[in-house]
Image (cartoon, coloured by chain):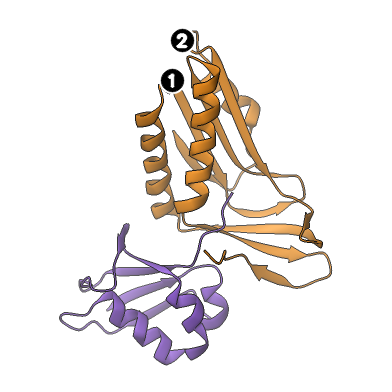
Chain colours: A orange, B purple
């Protein structure tokens, strides 16, 4: 299941949502707002999404992940809006029969999400000023 | 008419996140891109690096844009 939301991510509920007696392993990844980037101090981040396309491509990430590993349940959740330091911007919760599957599937899902899903962050620097982040490659 | 949506850093150049363009028969995604650059030349470096979507489908520059379509330009993503 995928979700794009303005509300705080409840990672406890997400983790519970993927647990099951069929799964021997649950992996949870949380992306959180980091204070320092290349020596520059962040005060906050704003996330913007092309919501309908992002939802479609997050569903594609779920499908790709399920086709590669025996995923029992997967939750992909991304925040939008204004986030303070330490807040959770993205969460992947995943359950599989065995731990190596859960680790690999979780890693794949977050890497693929960051590669293809149309969501962007804007840095609000502690010294003032803002800057959209657009990687070179 | 074609509704053009500009996301993230592209908005900083164009002042507005949305632009309306007159539709022409045979209009392509690449022509929409060129029209925006003519209007706002400073947007070119980032717009050139941006993917396009027509509706909810990713689209190449040679693809035609139907009348009343929504064309989105998506700069390199940085979610997560």
| Furthest residue toward top | A21
Locate residue B56 relative to residue A96 in the image: left or right.
left
**Residue pictured at 53% horizontal, 22% vertical:** A100
Name the mark on residue A85.
none
In depth, the one of A25 and A127 nearer the eye is A25
Q: Residue under mark 1: which chain is it in?
A: A
Locate residue B70 relative to residue A74 in the image: left or right.
left
Residue A15 in percent (x, y) is at 59, 24
Picture quadrant of residue A67? top left
In depth, the one of A102 and A17 nearer the eye is A102
- Give the vertical position of A114 relative to A43 (above or below): above
Residue A66 in percent (x, y) is at 38, 29
**Residue pictured at 81% horizontal, 61% vertical:** A39
Residue A92 in percent (x, y) is at 55, 34
Locate residue A22 relative to residue B58 in the image: left or right.
right
Name the mark on residue A22.
2
**Residue pictured at 55% horizontal, 67% vertical:** A136
Residue A10 in percent (x, y) is at 64, 33
- The answer to whether residue A3 is seen in the rendering is yes
**Residue pictured at 39% horizontal, 48% vertical:** A57
- The answer to whether residue B55 is seen in the rendering is no
Whether residues under marks 2 and 1 lie with C-beta atoms below 8 angstroms apart, the answer is yes
Q: Secondary structure at mark 1?
A: loop
Picture quadrant of residue A134? bottom right
Sequence order check, earlier mark of 2 and 1: 2
In depth, the one of B28 and A25 nearer the eye is A25
| Furthest residue toward left | B25
Q: Which residue is mark 1?
A: A72
| Furthest residue toward right | A127
């Amino acid at each position: 299941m995928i979700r794009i939301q303005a509300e705080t991510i409840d990672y406890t509920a997400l983790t519970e949502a993927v647990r099951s007696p069929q799964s021997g392993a649950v992996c949870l990844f949380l992306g959180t707002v980091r204070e320092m980037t290349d020596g520059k101090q962040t005060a906050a981040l704003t996330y913007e999404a092309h919501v309908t396309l992002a939802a479609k491509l997050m569903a594609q990430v779920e499908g790709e992940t399920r086709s590669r590993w025996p995923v029992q349940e997967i939750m992909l959740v991304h925040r939008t809006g204004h986030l303070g330091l330490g807040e959770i911007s993205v969460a992947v919760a995943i359950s599989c029969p065995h731990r190596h599957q859960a680790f690999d599937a979780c890693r794949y899902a977050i890497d693929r999400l960051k590669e293809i899903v149309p969501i962007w962050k804007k840095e609000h620097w502690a010294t003032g000023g803002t800057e959209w982040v657009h990687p070179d490659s | 008419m074609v509704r053009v949506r500009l996301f993230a850093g592209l908005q900083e150049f164009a002042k507005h996140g949305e632009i309306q363009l007159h539709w022409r028969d045979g209009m392509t995604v690449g022509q929409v891109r060129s029209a925006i650059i003519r209007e706002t030349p400073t947007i070119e470096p980032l717009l050139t690096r941006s993917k396009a979507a027509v509706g909810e489908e990713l689209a190449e520059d040679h693809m035609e844009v139907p009348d009343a379509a929504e064309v989105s330009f998506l700069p390199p993503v940085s979610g997560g």
